[in-house]
Image (cartoon, rainbow, N blue to C red):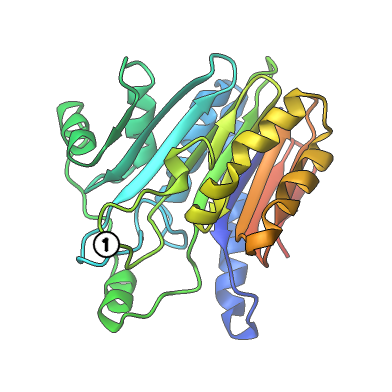
Amino acid sequence: MKIIIHGGFFSESVTDIETKIAKQQALLQIVKDAYAYLQVHTAVETVVYAVSLLENNTLFNAGIGSQIQSDGKIRMSASIMDGKTSKFSGVINIEEVKNPIKVAQVLMNEEDRVLSGLGANQFARAHGFDKFSTETPQRKAEYEAKVKSNGQGTVGCVVLDKNGNIAVATSTGGKGFEIVGRVSDSATVAGNYANSFCGVSLTGVGEDIVSNATAAKIVTRVTDGFTLEKAFEKTFEELKPYDGFAGAIAIDYKGNIYHQDSHPSMVFASFDGEKEEVFK
């Protein structure tokens, strides 16, 4: 059993040392809590659990603490993919929901599994998700000052469970000040993809990630026989012509864990019951 999570990107500025330590501690605690949860739950259940913990932490740009768009509203996106069944579900630009990833989880059982905007909102209300404002004073102040924080990004999780099944989940609060209607990579197969061979979750600039079809490429290459490292190497090379900004985490069916970013620095943590790793 293996698990790796990410919490977007983070500036390495010395003046941010307190935030850096807080994120390291938060990621390590969440990845260990999720690993304990994994002992008696499936890969799909665990990625939802881990991402919901990340959504509930204001240090990260997903769920509570999401960025505010150009019209003053918060719209979030999240998705799940089950590597065993190849089912993908997600919500795009959903509003006033505490945990978008949990709405995506309910959609796994529906025929129409990716909903956006009004449809996503109506589905959430109809399935017992009460209205919840994810706006924080910090995000409001940033919006009013039109200054973006250095804690932007997306959160995600990849899990390999005791039965060898892989699942992945990704959630984002957007990039901040975006045009209304902008679609994040987090609810697409470019930013969140898995099959029985590999699972990958992305963070970074959504437009760059979609242009490169990053997650789907990595997973396909592992399926076709590439090692996880080589699949990352080739796919990240393809970001370079347009200086693509991306970070990715992954686990393959052999239990190999890998992560890479094109620009410093993605924040992440992994755990396998014995060995822990957290971004430096």
Q: Position of residue 6 (x, y in %)?
A: 59, 50
Residue nearer the viewer, 105 or 29? 105
Q: Is residue 29 left or right of residue 141?
A: right
Residue pointed to by mark 1: 135
Against 254, is 22 above or below? below
Q: Answer with the quarter of the image where residue 52 lies.
A: top left
Residue 27: x and y in percent read: 59, 53
Q: What kind of residue is marked 1?
A: Glu
Residue in the picture at 49% in, 68% down: 151
Q: Is residue 147 left or right of residue 223?
A: left
Placement of 219 over or under 62, stated as above or below: above
What residue appears at the point 80 percent right and 34 percent down from the top-left corner?
256
Number of labels in the image equals: 1
Which residue is at 71% across, 41% downward?
Answer: 271
> Extreme front residue here?
241
Report the side of 70 relative to 48 (left or right): left
The vertical placement of 109 against 248, above or below, is above
- Name which quarter of the figure residue 64 lies in: bottom left
Badge 1 crowding class, 10 Å Cα cut-off, few under 14, some 14 to 19, many 20 or more, is some
Q: Quadrant of the C terminus?
A: bottom right
Residue in the foreground of this view, choosing between 232 and 276 = 232
- Where residue 191 appears, as percent x and y from the top left, is 53, 42
Looking at the image, can residue 235 be seen?
A: yes
Q: Residue at x 68, y 28 (%)?
A: 220
Residue 91 percent across, percent down from the top left: 33, 37
Determine whether the residue tagged by mark 1 lies in a helix, strand or loop.
loop
* Quarter of the image with the N terminus in it: top right
Q: Is residue 33 visible?
A: no
- Give 53 or 91, whichever is nearer the viewer: 91
**In the image, is 215 to the left or to the right of 187?**
right
